[in-house]
Image (cartoon, rainbow, N blue to C red):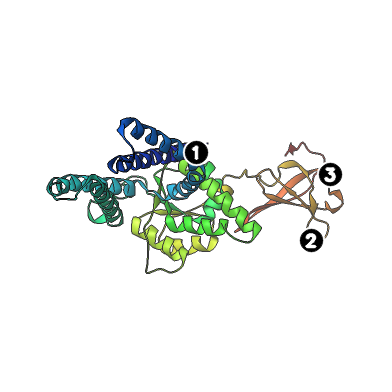
Amino acid sequence: MSSSYQLARALLSLCGAALGWLLADWLIEQQVLMGAVNLGYLTLLGLLTGYLLSPPLAHRIERLWERVRPRLSPDAVLAAGIGATLALIITVLLNSLLQNIPGFTWYWSLLLTIVLVVASSWFFVVNRQLFAPRAVFSSSTPEGGPRPKIIDTSAIIDGRIVEVVESHFIDGSLLIPALVLGELQHIADSDDPLRRRRGRRGLTLLDRLVQQRIVKTEVINDDVPEAQEIDDKLIKLCLKRGADLITTDYNLNRIAALQGIRVLNVNHLANAIKVAFLPGEHLSLYVVKEGREPGQGLSYLEDGTMVVIEDAKNLVGQTVDVVVTSNLQTTMGRMIFAKRSNGAPSTSL
């Protein structure tokens, strides 16, 4: 079981013990029970009852926590802590003033504490930008340092960005907008099986991205009410925070670049690090299928680069030695054209 599940069971058991103690205290006041022994017995009974009945509710709390945890940014946690601390200080002062009022028991003191802590924490989280300098409640990096990078849904689902980060090719901080989390969750809840699998894969990869310690990763709750579409919101967020954009979406890439945003497209990176084969180099390739044009055969390199081989239509399912004739760079990636060689030494792929 996860630590969050065990913690939830422990807290629920303590709640059961507290309820048992309250019940025993009330029964003693009503003279139904007598003595501290019965108080201890009922408290222990409440503890055991809470522990035995806690699993279903603990599972619900665990699932809720796993959904909420990625959305908790450090600045929100700090703001909530400040609000709770201030509320506790105010509660101590109020209790000193109210304790002499007839009927003001510890029940009312506990209720007052809970209300003030919840209200103050919520208020500070919602309005955290108003109570501290941007250097405290912000993910922006100092001028001259690495720029923060906002990642979109397409890059998360694609998954390669995780390996790029784990290979130390990304510096600065990664910012994950809450609206991207919402879009991922919507895809994961889709009725279409393929979209649902893609969404769940994205959530798994996102969790892996959040857990890594190479680059600081933060979920941001910034909203851009003046923008309606998610792509527009992402562009506004990049401009607002002075951040780069990580994406694999071709159209979003173009639009963001036109507005002066530096875009890190994982597809461009993948194409840039592919091995280059010059005309005249010899390769040994396995012909996978026929090409679109008459007589052509198709093969693929290990990095996914497609190789079009002349006069290889009848060699499907066989390994053939070829010589590279030319390369073609397209928006979809790199293509290599080759023809059958005349027995020169080749590189096996």
The residue wearing badge 1 is: 52
Residue density around tag 2, few if under 14, some if 14–19, many if 20 or more, within 10 Å: few
Q: Residue at x 82, y 60 (%)?
A: 294
Looking at the image, is mark 3 or mark 1 earlier in the sequence? Answer: 1
Residue 41 relative to residue 187: left or right: left
User: Residue 29 at x, y = what percent?
Assistant: 28, 42
Mark whose residue sits in front, 3 or 1? 1
Q: Which mark is residue 293?
A: 2
Location of mark 3 (residue): 318
Q: Picture coordinates of residue 303 (x, y %)? A: 65, 45
345 and 265: which one is in front? 265
Find numbered disc 2 in the image and state the secondary structure of the residue it sits on.
Answer: loop
Badge 1 marks a residue whose secondary structure is: helix
Q: Amino acid at mark 3?
A: Gln
Residue drawn at x 65%, y 57% as measured from the top left: 194
For disc 3, the neighbor class at 10 Å (few under 14, some 14 to 19, many from 20) is few
Q: Earlier in the sequence, mark 1 or mark 2?
A: 1
Label 1 is placed on what type of residue? Leu
Disc 2 residue type (three-letter)? Glu
